[in-house]
Amino acid sequence: MEPKQEPMKNNDDGVLEDVTLNQEEDEFDSKERVLHKYFLQEWKLLKSLLDDTVSNGRVSDPSSVHKFRSIIDKYQEQGQLIEPYLESMVSPLMNIIRSRTIELGADSDEILEIINPICIIIYSLVTVCGYKAVIKFFPHQVSDLELAVSLLEKCHLTSSGTSLRQESTGEMEAKCVMLLWLYILVLVPFDISTVDTSIANNENLNEFELAPLVLRIIGFCKDYLATAGPMRTMAGLVLSRLLTRPDMPKAFMSFVEWTHEVMSSVTEDILRHFQLLGAIEALAAIFKAGSRNLLLDVIPLVWNDTSILYKSSTASRSPLLRKFIMKLTQRIGLTALPHRLPSWRYTSNMDVHGNSSKSNEVTDGAEDEDMEVPENVEEIIEMLLSGLRDMDTIVRWSAAKGIGRITSRLTSSLSEEVLSSVLELFSPGEGDGSWHGGCLALAELARRGLLLPTSLPKVVPVVVKALHYDVRRGPHSVGSHVRDAAAYVCWAFGRAYYHADMRSILENLAPHLLTVACYDREVNCRRAAAAAFQENVGRQGNYPHGIDIVNTADYFSLSSRVHSYLHVAIFIAQYEGYLLPFVDDLLDRKICHWDKSLRELAAEALSFLVKYDPQYFATTVMEKLIPCTLSSDLCMRHGATLATGELVLALHRCSYALPLDKQKTLAGVVPAIEKARLYRGKGGEIMRSAVSRFIECISISKVALSEKIKRSLLDTLNENLRHPNSQIQNAAVKALKHFIQAYLLASDNKGTTDVTAKYLNMLTDPNVAVRRGSALAIGILPYELLASQWRNVILKLCGCCAIEENPEDRDAEARVNAVRGLVSVCETLIGGREDAAKPVIENDISLFVLIKNEVMMTLFKALDDYSVDNRGDVGSWVREAALDGLEKCTYMLCKIDNSASLSGTSNGKEIESSVQPLNDNLPKNNQELLLFDQNLATSLIRGICKQALEKMDKLREAAANVLHRILYNQMIYIPYIAFREKLEEIIPKEAEAKWAVPSYSYPRFVQLLQFGCYSRDVLSGLVISIGGLQDSLKKVSLSALMEYLEEVEFEEHNTRMSREYMLSDDILWVLQHYKKCDRVIIPSLKTIEILFSKKVFLNMEANTTTFCAGVLDSLAIELKGSKDFSKLYAGIAILGYVASVPEPINMRAFSQLVSFLVHRYPKIRKAAAEQAYLVLLQNGNLVAEDKIEKALEILCDTCWDGDIDLAKQQRVALCETIGLEVVPIGKNTEGASSKTSTKKPTDLDENASYSSLVESSGF
């Protein structure tokens, strides 16, 4: 052994050298070295943990157990990688348990502390590798039997403190390991009574009585059979080995009688239920391990109990119990039947000449006659067949394996009867469970060679039906498990049969398998069918194009349903024999599928197949689809309408000209749908979308339409534009764009002007859905319809972008669509003028100026749309659309400026190189002639940067990306951007897309506060984040601002002061600009409060007084009559800070603070009193020394949140004490006169009540 151990040692010391070995060297290396390199990669760490445990004789560090288990758990699905190391791990650990138990004794209290952590490690190996692989390395001396029983008895008395595996302290694992140890030890080749040392001390023991050691083992196992943990299974294994020993017939019979009592006395008690499960599981293990001679005598009793129990209500409620009953039933049947290898079984081995050596499937008649089939076998098979119909998969799977095993011991004629019974499960009246169980049974029969090739012609049609099994139940369907199991049957066929027998079968199955692989809704079914096809291609020889198909339809390519439909299936369909099955499957099953998204995908997939045979699709397929558009089934008519439209479009792209009669039929599809009133009722909405898509497809294909049908289709699209569903509107807009191009512009101009006028009138319709649709429709109108009245169109759309005056008419989606429509109209007008290649005329200049003065200003106003309703900040949709629109309009204006400046130069690179110095250096008087000037550029960057600092991640990211594209546009240089170099530092050209991450964006954009042209707008966005409700955003944004203020503190003090001064000036601007706008004012006040708490603005010398005075002026306005608690709390806190600054501003602040002592709200009075108390306590010079104690006493002793009259008296007393003038109540306390309080304020927000609620919360 020594020479063999040396390479192992060298390998452990030279792991780094092993890693550099080439693959070729592995062939000549030792097995141990290769294993250590490629399999258990953490072996070095595990080895160190094991060595430490062995050297200490116990687990010294409890954390090492967790490390060991976490490493082993990673190999859960690849346990075979650990098996080469099991001996070096299990043997030392079991030897520790054995030696320490002998040393300390099983009764020692310390022994459990030693073995429990070790058992956790061993049990983790059992869970990964299985108990059979692990127990081979357990010690199995005869003397260990009593030792293991004593340890089990010690463990038996303990209980686990937690049910969580991660927190386990080893009690359960110790019991499992001890039971597995006994599983090996009870096989000692001696009479156990000779091993039991307690017999020597007991002279009264009868020779027919069981040894005490056996009774102890059986007693423990019976206890564990009544538990719910893994000990139940392991106790059954121990009993199966112990009771089937030749010297244990009495113990065996006693146990059978005990199980008879358990199975006969079924109660509702949950503990009794676990005991019943354990008893059935133990019997199943015994019938697997015991000899036939021992078990034959007890079969009648056990079978009778089992059959009665299966029919009981207890079994009907417990899937696990039914599974164990199936397992026991099949083993009873296997015991009752003599073991035989049937001569009729199919084999597919090859002889040396390459011929099949399969049997001729001739049944030995004499053998059939000689074989006696026990009476209960028929009942057993019946029970297993009923198990195939069970509602639970685990029961069906166990029953299927039982059918396969028992059939292998039957004669040929009896096996045919079993097959016939299995095929009856596939009758139309059976449920999905029967079909699934039948497929599992067929697969088991095929795998075992029990399904003869002569039976395949009647089996394959059933399997094909199962491959497409899908039964609609309510809003969904069932059958994916049946299709999965059917693919498993096909996989079993490929493994079981010789290619000569499978050639015709595979030709029949292959199209169906690939149809499921490409078009099934469930990914597991697609992968299962592809695996079955791959197995057949690999094992059945040279199948046409099999390798190419297998390489394309692999596990990963089929994971995406869209990729399967639109790529994998299209590739496979090019091969002969697959196109028609694919088309049939789409037409028969997928076009009418219950899943709307699948119908849409199927229609698209069908159109992708047109290129392989346009004639077939234009005739046969279309003739099938068109009548289905009027089907009574919603799914069918929706899918057929979509598919018909997609086919027409695909044929057009293939340059296939449809006959006039077919075009006439297509033109009548939509009028027929409308005549049948199929827009009404359930499903009318999805039919509208489908019809819009159909019109879009025939418009692109330019199908010939009569004038009457043109008007009818236009009315249909206009009706869909008025629908409140946005998806229907979008589909109608897409269709309208192509419809106008194909049918309205191609004919005479009569009526085209009416279309534009009609949509303009719809912009002011009271119905918001009409306004939404009309704005989108105007956006897609062609240049020819807009050229005559472009000014009216633009001005009307500009008006629709603004928030409506009447709160009841306000609609965010209408404004979003108006913004998008406005930008699209501008693009169309500019693009149409360029396409016409006409010189610039006065009319064009008016258009350009209108875009600059009206459109850009409208988009800037849209950036200030902060409307809210019950969905939240719906104005953010408008702002996002405005950002996109500003970017596009900027490019338009700059492009016009460039073309005018360069006198026709249009090359993008020339523009970028020549326009930059030309435009940036123009004198101011010439800039007045430009469309995109310095003021517009500054306003643009200000608006974008403001959005880049607000609280919504999506908008911040959108704004930053827009700014990035404007700065680095390759085709059009955007001039006049102030501090462009600094902006390019903030947003580098190769910046990663992290702008939605606050910690990335805020520290960058906050740097713009140092530039006066941007700082105010930047700050108005920043305060929203700092003073908002999101703690994480507040923390990041505030941190960025403080770093900005402090980053120059150690370099130049004046720079820091100037930054503070600029910030204070900008804050005062924000307070003035957003006066009485709580959306900005409340977070601004919170921001000021936070900055005051961090000593910002308090050390600006004279500027501090100026800033504080401005803040007090704003507070006097904002807090007057306010009912918003967060606003009042922030204002009171600010008054407290200002009251602490030097005179003379402090007394003014304190006077305002004292006025809140008689506020209408008790909580506000209390907060004001607390703040006033802190101010007096911290500023002794505010009040005379002889009066400060009295003032503090009044503030402390008064219950400010109590009676208002008392509060008023105490406030007067406080004012007299500190020498303040008593302001009459009503001027400064309530903050509003009776006139103001009774007048209802005009609410400019949508859904006023909800808006006030949301805004009062800080959003």
Image: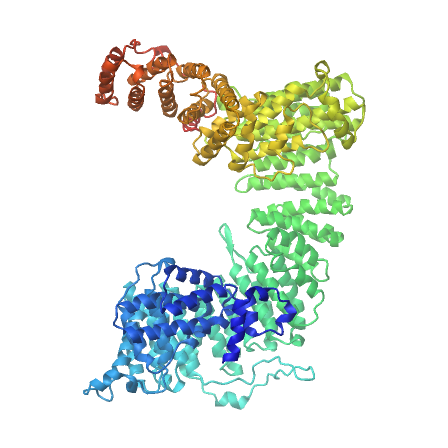
Location of residue 682 in the rendering, given as x and y in whole percent from the top left corner? 52, 42
Horizontal side of 886 relative to 906 (left or right) equals left
Q: Quadrant of residue 862?
A: top right
Figure quadrant of residue 916: top right
| Residue 144 placement, left or right of 476 | left
Q: Quadrant of the C terminus?
A: top left
Colour scheme of the picture: rainbow
Q: Quadrant of residue 1015?
A: top right
Q: Is residue 629 above or below residue 958?
A: below
Tell me: residue 809, above or below residue 1223: below
- The image position of residue 969, as x and y in percent, is 69, 32
Q: Residue at x 64, y 45 (%)?
A: 642
Residue 650 in view, yes or no: yes
Whole-percent x and y of residue 703? 74, 40
Does residue 306 appear anywhere in the picture? no
Residue 481's place in the image compared with 1053, above or below, is below
Image coordinates for residue 514, horizontal then vertical, percent: 64, 61
Residue at x 43% of width, y 35% of height:
1031
Between 614 and 1184, the residue placed more toward the observer is: 1184
Q: How many marks?
A: 0
